[in-house]
Image (spheres, rainbow, N blue to C red):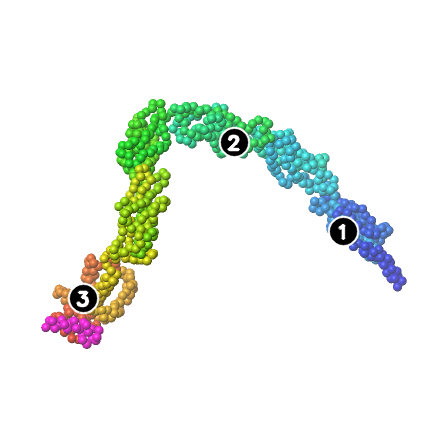
Amino acid sequence: MNCSALLSLLLMLVQLWPCFLSTQKRSSQNTDQSFTAVRRVKRGWVWEPLFATEEQTSMVPLYVGQLKSDLDKQDGNLKYILTGEGAGSTFIIDENNGKIYVTQKLDREYKSFYTLRAQAINRSTQLPVEPESEFIIKVRDINDHEPQFLDGPYEATVPEMSPEGTSVTQVTATDGDDPSYGNSARLLYSLIQGQPYFSVEPKTGVIRMASQMDRETEDQYLVIIQAKDMVGQAGAFSATATVTINLSDINDNPPKFQQQLYYMNVSEEAPVGTTVGKVFAEDSDIGENAAMNYFIEGDSSDVFDIITNNETQEGIILLKKRVDYESKRRYSIQAKVVNRYIDYRFLKEGPFEDKTTVKINVENADEPPVFTLENYVMEIAEGATSGSLVGVVTARDPDDDDCPVRYSIVQGMHLKRLFSINEHNGTIITTKPLDREIASWHNITVTATETRNPEKISEANVYIQVLDINDHAPEFPKYYETFVCENAVSGQLIQSISAVDQDDSAEGHHFYFSLAQEATNNSHFTVKDNKDNTAGIFTAKSGFRRQEQFSFYLPILILDNGTPPLTSTNTLTITVCDCDTEVNTFYCRYGAFIYAMGLSTEALVAVLACILILLVFFLAIVAIRQQRKKSPFSEKMEEFRENIVRYDDEGGGEEDTEAFDISALRTRTVMRTHKPRKKVTTEIHSLYRQSLQVGPDSAIFRQFISEKLEEANADPSAPPYDSLQTYAFEGTGSLAGSLSSLGSNVSDVDQSYDYLTDWGPHFKQLAGMYASQGSVGD
């Protein structure tokens, strides 16, 4: 028993030893290699590559291949076991001989191979005699898928007139079959529709031009491409795709005028810029290839112009200069059109331009008169007598009938007063002498009107320049305020002077200064001409005394360089100032003023002091009078103000009973406001006396309020807004009792006011006033 167990253990070790060595050397084995059996190192397995064809159906399992161990003695002692993908369901194995069968239909496009594991064990010992090893069953493809164009439909664009062989586009089809096995996925492309204009490469699907095509003949083609698998053999599947090929435009056509001769008309009255007519050239191209420019050739380009309408590609002929029927009645111009963008590849086929002739007739019109000049410039000397000739304007009727014209001035009234024009010959004369110093230029507008058609009027500008004559003598530009100190020395400069002249001098003004003849011999001052239109005033002696002579009047002669030269005598006033060597202008002006008034400084100070005293006295009197005008009740004003209650709340009208509570103003007995004493009727006396005995809700009280309400509504001086008038009573029951005299038989004379003295100091003034009235009454 022990010997048999020992023998079994030794046999097991012998069987497992090759597996142990194979396991150690399998670390470098790649189990992910596709479609090949797992590589073994020194193993006992023997099999060929295994394949199973897809899409096979059978009632019985189909044989795939056989697994075999070299340890198999064909004695049935080994058992084969299959595990892995699809083992037992898709694939089964005969455990006695290792034959593998497929039991289900396979789809290579779903799964292209299966990875399985095989093991051989001893039936007696249930121990493996072969190590577990991986192998792959590859699914063999059959042609069961059609080609597909996944990117269709296709559209491509190619320039027209492209040379033969130009690539247009490429189409590509896909096939779900195995491209590595057989010809199931090998596609061939062919052209079903599109000959003879296009061709397709069979293997790549590239579509090429087969001939040159003109877009103007046909601009779009429909091409049908077929893709066929199995290299076109029998039983192949196919698919088609449509390719839309558009021909893009190139500039291969020149523009062409629709007419070789155009006739147009233009009125001689048409202003510059008027549209004379339009010409049009056709171009079979489109877009920018059809863009064109128009030109005018010849001498007529200075009279007419042509521009291009970029939207319609028309040539618009415009009037560049006014035309005259009487001068030229017909024009013949050459218009040329040229493509804006030229493709130089096609220049050999001819120039991309065209020409046409345009005949333009000038239509006669009744034109207004035409002046010989648009602007006239005339001159006249200032001071010219009235009626002096200024110049002549001339206008004529350009029409053949040469209608007479009439001239007039159409400017402001002041110009009409200065100039007049002969309506028959256009002679302009002055109506009064002109002064250049007032206005050196005069601008007038002269009109010429046809006598037979007054609506035909034309205008011309006349610019009249008034020429200057030397009619103004030079003079001082300003009043010179000149002072000289009493201790001035001889030859001292005290003033610099200049001159101005209103006249205009072509050579520039030159003034000459000198003393007047009457002051040459006995003058205390001299004049030095600086030869630059200025002069200096110098003292001719030393020392001046203001007490002897306060001011000097120096006549200065000024001569200009006009033709004829004019002179003027200007007087310079020199004031003697009480100063040392430098003049203080303010002090000297002050001294001159005092001297002119004939007052000394002390006298002036005394006058100012008296004025100040009188001013203070006047202000004191005014203050005293203002104090006397104050109210005798000023001391009590604050007390009176303290008793005034003002309500700024606005009521809501007659129905507003919630604005404020008036019950606080009422006592148990109805009171009535005090009114100034006046004569009242017996009815009012009786009404009041009755009210003293009743409450506020009695009929008498309501009647009294109604009467007062009507009185207030009829009062024209009442304010135009809602107001609340309360008619209450003092009467019986009030704290003060009745203050009214209506209920008393005692007259005002018999009334005693002695009780006012007992009311305190606040009523002292009032008690005094009534006490004085009582004494007067007595």
Point out the residue furthest to the left here: 778
Three-letter amino acid code at disc 1?
Thr
Q: How many residues crowd around disc 1 within 10 Å: few (fewer than 14), some, or many (20 or more)?
A: some
Residue on which the image places disc 2:
292
| Marking on residue 1 | none
Residue on which the image places disc 1:
31
Name the N-terminal-most of marks 1 and 3. 1
In 3D space, how far apart are the residues under numbered discs 1 and 2 (Cα atoms)? 75 Å
In 3D space, how far apart are the residues under numbered discs 1 and 3 (Cα atoms)? 132 Å
| Marking on residue 675 | 3
Instruction: Say which of 136 and 571 sits in front.
Output: 571
- The residue located at (44%, 28%) in the rendering is 303
Secondary structure, mark 3, is: loop
Can residue 182 be seen in this snapshot? yes
Q: Does the magenta stretch include residue 519?
A: no
Residue bounds of the magenta highlight = 756-778
